[in-house]
Image (spheres, rainbow, N blue to C red):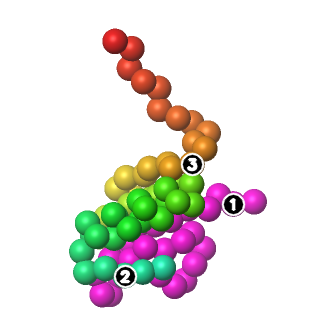
């Protein structure tokens, strides 16, 4: 079974938020910032990962809003 994820990707009309494996966008936005904001809210509510892509399609950043199997280790003070 594949993990459910959301992706912020460039589109012909600006930026889109797509679910993994989906051809159609959940929503499209004029700016990347608005798409990322929506993607974060969607991923938080679905407890999924969010992949933010650059204009060339490469992954720029990844955030987990669910049960992360590899959570970051906090720095000891």
Query: Does the magenta portion include 24?
Result: yes
Per the image, the residue denoted by label 3 is 66
- Rendered image: mark on residue 2: 1
Relative to the observer, which residue lies in front, 57 or 48?
A: 48
The residue that label 2 is drawn on is 28
Mark 2 falls on what kind of element? strand
CB contact under 8 Å: marks 2 and 1? no
User: Which residue shows up at 24% across the image and 74% down it?
Assistant: 31
Alpha-carbon neighbours of circle 2 within 10 Å: few (<14), some, or many (≥20)? many
Residue 32 lies, in percent from the top left, at 27, 70
Residue 10 lies left or right of residue 3; in this view the side is: left
Quadrant where the image shows the N terminus? bottom right
Percent across and percent down for residue 13 are 30, 87
Query: Comparing marks 3 and 1, which lies closer to the viewer?
Result: 3
The magenta stretch spans residue 36: no
Disc 3 crowd rating (10 Å Cα; few below 14, some 14-19, many 20+) is: few
Distance from disc 3 to disc 1, alpha carbons, whole Å, reads 15 Å
| Badge 3 or badge 2: first in the primary sequence | 2
Q: Nearer the viewer, mark 2 or mark 1?
A: 2
* Sequence order check, earlier mark of 3 and 1: 1
Q: Is residue 43 above or below residue 14?
A: above
Q: Residue furthest right?
A: 1
Residue 21 in the image: x percent, y percent? 60, 73
Q: Which stretch appears magenta?
A: 1-25
Q: Residue at x 50, y 50 (%)?
A: 65
Q: Does residue 11 show up? A: yes
């Amino acid at each position: 079974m594949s993990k459910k994820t959301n992706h912020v990707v460039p589109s012909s009309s600006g930026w889109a938020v797509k679910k993994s494996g989906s051809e159609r966008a959940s929503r499209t936005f004029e700016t990347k910032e608005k798409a990322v904001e929506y993607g974060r809210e969607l991923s938080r509510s679905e407890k999924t990962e969010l992949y933010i892509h650059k204009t060339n399609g490469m992954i720029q950043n990844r955030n987990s809003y669910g049960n992360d199997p590899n959570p970051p280790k906090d720095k000891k003070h």
